[in-house]
Image (spheres, grey):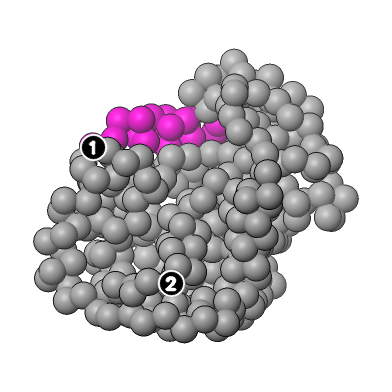
Amino acid sequence: MILVTGAAGHIGNVLMRELLSEGRSVRALILPGEDISSLEGLDVEITEGNVLDPASLNKAMDGIDIVFHLAGVISIMPGKNEWMQKVNVEGTKNVLRMAKENGISRFVYTSSIHALSRSWRGKIDERVPFDPDNLAGGYDRTKAAASLAVLDAVKEGLDAVIVCPTGVIGPHDYRGSEMGDLLQSWFRRKIHMLVKGEYDFVDVRDVAHGHILACDRGRTGEVYILSGRQIKVFELKKLVQESIGRRIVSFTIPMFVAKIAARAMPLYYRLTKKIPKFTEYSLETLQSNSDVSSGKARRELGYKPRKLAVTIKDTVLWLLLKKQKANSR
């Protein structure tokens, strides 16, 4: 039996689908009262718990052989976020401790490309160290600290591997991720304001399958980057336009203007409660080194990400169907 924490999230629910398609028995750990519409219709066992509650984790791991730990808080907002620190770091340490106490045979941790040092020059691969002091943002620091905790647990005898996805996009984005929201904004018939920049994006289905490959074939204590393709923002928007059969005018905002505007955006997002996608952190990410290699995962795991054009086409179709269903209710 397999336990997946963060099962109702974007990567989580797609991982559940991949595991089920392979005939594996899965238990989903969800928060009490959490929206689990992303798991609707899936033949999985549901158990409530919290990574900050060791007793609930102990119960969730009863009869479990393998743990995929995906639960975490993502934020690109500036400032200190104590909740993200607690969930991402202390929560991971709780899951690790309970995994050791319950004799879990394999532990797969979902880290992030953002957990790696941003000062690295040249192609980014698994030689880049985790950086718990990363100045880019709190998310980066918490994922790095949690990743180091996993490596410490390996030294203490836990059979664990770490995967680091890049920018995840794809179907089954039920909660509306930052990237999903951005792609949808490009459906609208209005002039789109873009900034120059690029990043590496990967299909959520390939990330989910990469998790399973890491579980089945990954070497204990190793890190595997799950990347896709590096692409410029304008090229990404072009793929979206081709998928919806619509060409919409865009113009470039100078980066210095974008950075000035970004300083005021956190207040706007807090007041409107909209999904943040235009912050100083996101701008810095688009300007950072995104020359990422998945060579190690390809060689050792057999990881083969699909073409990004296919991902965008499938994602756009899924988002349009989702919108159509919502409008028909």
Kind of residue at badge 2: Arg
Name the residue carrying label 2.
189
Residue, x 78% and y 32% (percent of image)? 45
Q: Pick the residue in front: 46 or 295.
A: 46
For the stretch drawn in magenta, the main secondary structure is: helix
- Label 2, residues with CA under 10 Å away: few <14, some 14-19, many ≥20: few
- The Cα atoms of the two marked residues, 2 and 1, are separated by 37 Å
Indicate left or right for 293 with 258 as reference.
right
Q: Taking 97 as reference, is 285 above or below it?
A: below
Indicate left or right for 185 with 195 as reference.
right
Residue, x 68% and y 44% (percent of image)? 329
Magenta part of the chain: 80-96
Kind of residue at badge 1: Lys
Residue, x 24% and y 45% (percent of image)? 268
Q: Nearer the viewer, mark 2 or mark 1?
A: 2
> In the image, residue 238 lies at what x, y percent?
46, 83
Q: Pick the residue in front: 237 or 45.
A: 237
Name the residue carrying label 1.
80
